[in-house]
Image (cartoon, helix red, strand yellow):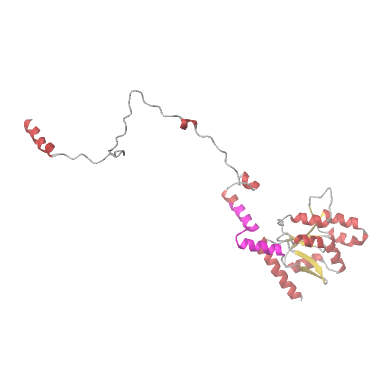
Amino acid sequence: MKIKRQKQAKKTISFHKYNFSFREPFHILLDGTFCQAALKNKIQIKEQMPKYLMGEVQLCTTNCALKELDTLGKELYGAKIILQRFQVRNCAHFKNPVPASECLLSMLEETNPHHYFVATQDRTVTEGLKNIPGVPLLYIILNTIVLDKPSQASLDQVQAVQLGELVSPAQQHSIRSLKEQQGIAPQDGERRGKKRKRKQSNPNPLSCLKKKKKKGVPTPPPSKTATGEKKKRSRHKKRKTETDITAAPAITNAQ
């Protein structure tokens, strides 16, 4: 069973590496429920997590998760001690703490740009993760850490990228880096996600002036044929007539 879980975890990690640009060290966002489950099942998170994910990890949490354990009392004191050992990432609720489930989901935003793994036993968080593509979920079951399979939202986004309907985050990053190398700065419309509209310019006032007629020089009317069409100018050289040829030697003799 352990070998089977290890193979499934390796397959899931490869999926997120290839499609969502996950790299080591893996950033794992934990809450108090996961630490409490690890404490009950005697799981050493710092030792077992890198072995299970087959790579370096960075364990982190938020200020809201720590505040929530303070309010729950002595029953979760051990989970609080474990959670305090990890890095605390800045969240948007520093002055006004919110429930840990709400805070974790806000850290992921809409596309998980910081490539977080989420370790939790909270059903509210796991249900919210189903709508966010590219978020690996970790939980504890039967005294072991388990990495869940890719969510349906992740599979749908990968399929849309393969069909050419979307651009993957990795492709967006490579396009952005290529533009920076070539010195192409994004326009204001691209930064805001809107196209710039061209302003309607007025015509040049000099081009609207009428042409002046020259005084004393009448403009000849265009020559027309009997059918009324304009006569085309012929560019052929004028041929010499027979009278011109016979008259030419006579003039030389007279001289």
Q: Main secondary structure of the magenta part?
A: helix
Judge from the rendering whether residue 245 lies leftward or rightward of residue 108; answer left or right. left
- The boundaries of the magenta stretch are 151-178
Residue 140 rendering spot, x and y as whole percentages: 81, 68
Judge from the rendering whether residue 57 lies leftward or rightward of residue 37; answer left or right. left
- Image quarter where the C terminus lies is top left
Q: Nearer the viewer, residue 51 or 235?
A: 235
Q: Is residue 28 visible?
A: no
Q: Is residue 151 above or below residue 92?
A: below
Judge from the rendering whether residue 187 lies leftward or rightward of residue 114; answer left or right. left
Q: Is residue 152 magenta?
A: yes
Residue name at image x 59 percent, y 53 percent:
178
Residue 246 position by quadrant = top left
Residue 19 rendering spot, x and y as whole percentages: 66, 62
Residue 58 rendering spot, x and y as whole percentages: 76, 60
Residue name at image x 71 percent, y 64 percent:
152
Residue 25 position by quadrant = bottom right
Q: Is residue 223 magenta?
A: no
Q: Is residue 251 visible?
A: yes
